[in-house]
Amino acid sequence: MTAPNPTESPPRPPLTGLKTLLRTRVSAGLLTVLPVYITYLVVSFIFVLMRDTSQWLIVLMLRPPLGDPFLKAWGFDFENWHALQAKLSELGLTPTGDQFMQFLPWGVQWAVPLLAVLLTVFLLYFVGLLAANMIGRRLINFFENLLERLPLIKTVYRALKQILASFSGDTQKNFQRVALIPFPDARMRAVGFVTNTFRDSVSGEDLVSVFIPTTPNPTTGFLQVLKRGEISEMNWTVEEGVRMIMSGGILKPEYLTTVLNRDLPKAITAGDRRYEMPIASEEDAPAPP
């Protein structure tokens, strides 16, 4: 009879292995489905927003009596429609656009939202066309001046306009460099984006504003103002930085390199030395003893 080897671990119960397998498979399925689901939510939100912007106008043009020629061609049920109007008028109400849509043929009900989205795109193009010429620019400035005179609205409008203007430009200019930031503790480092540079008028020190996104939603985060020497700029592109943040570090570039930043003013360039530090992966980890 052989003595048991003290270095061998006891066999795991079958139930423990089943729990591990179940957790692994569910996690893999979640990582597969979650990006698709979030993409669906974002696209649906944008579609509904663009649809609701113009659909009321299309419904108004289709409702009797303006849309009678089209409604007669589609076999619109005028009798039940007038009965609904009479019933609601007794209560002091009028039929809504959704109630009117229910009387339209199935194909028209699908076509109206798509037409509304196309109309919204056309309206946005038309506004952009106005903003590109002198007469349209003066008209837009007139309405902006009206908003600027309203006490509460002007504050919100200015802030939103500046934020949208910053994100509508070149991302590489707005996010000038990916950097490692001492956050939330001096001994720790967080991935952030240098968004602007300025100088302290009293001490003359060069400062940088850094946006530190949160994981996995990079649209929220923290804004830090630091001395230039307190950050370490990297050679990652903005896309690589965002991809690593959204994936929680799973999707990473092969190397982390601090580099000279020649795109920023000389006062805030990195140090004279260049460091290349491979990011450790599971394959590089030392084998257990």
Image: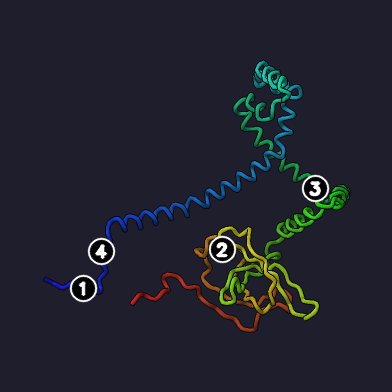
Residue 139 position, x and y percent, is 87, 47
Q: In this view, does 214 lie to the left or right of 89?
A: left
Residue at the image point whose x is 71% and y is 22% from the top: 91
Q: Residue 129 carries which label?
A: 3
Q: Mark 2 points at which residue?
A: 245
Q: Which residue lies furthest to the front in this view?
A: 91
- Nearer to us in this view, 66 or 248: 248
Q: How far apart are marks 4 and 1 (CA)?
A: 13 Å
Q: Distance between the residues labelled 4 and 3?
A: 72 Å
Residue 120 position, x and y percent, is 72, 41
Q: What element carries label 3?
A: helix
Q: Is mark 2 on a helix, strand or loop?
A: helix
Q: In this view, does 60 lie above or below 276?
A: above
**Nearer-N-terminus badge (4/3):** 4
Q: Mark 1 points at which residue?
A: 5
Instruction: Pick the quarter of the image with the N terminus.
Output: bottom left
Q: Name the residue under label 4.
A: 11
Residue at the image point whose x is 69% and y is 26% from the top: 95
Amino acid at pointer 2: Ile
Instruction: Determine the image quadrant of residue 15.
Output: bottom left
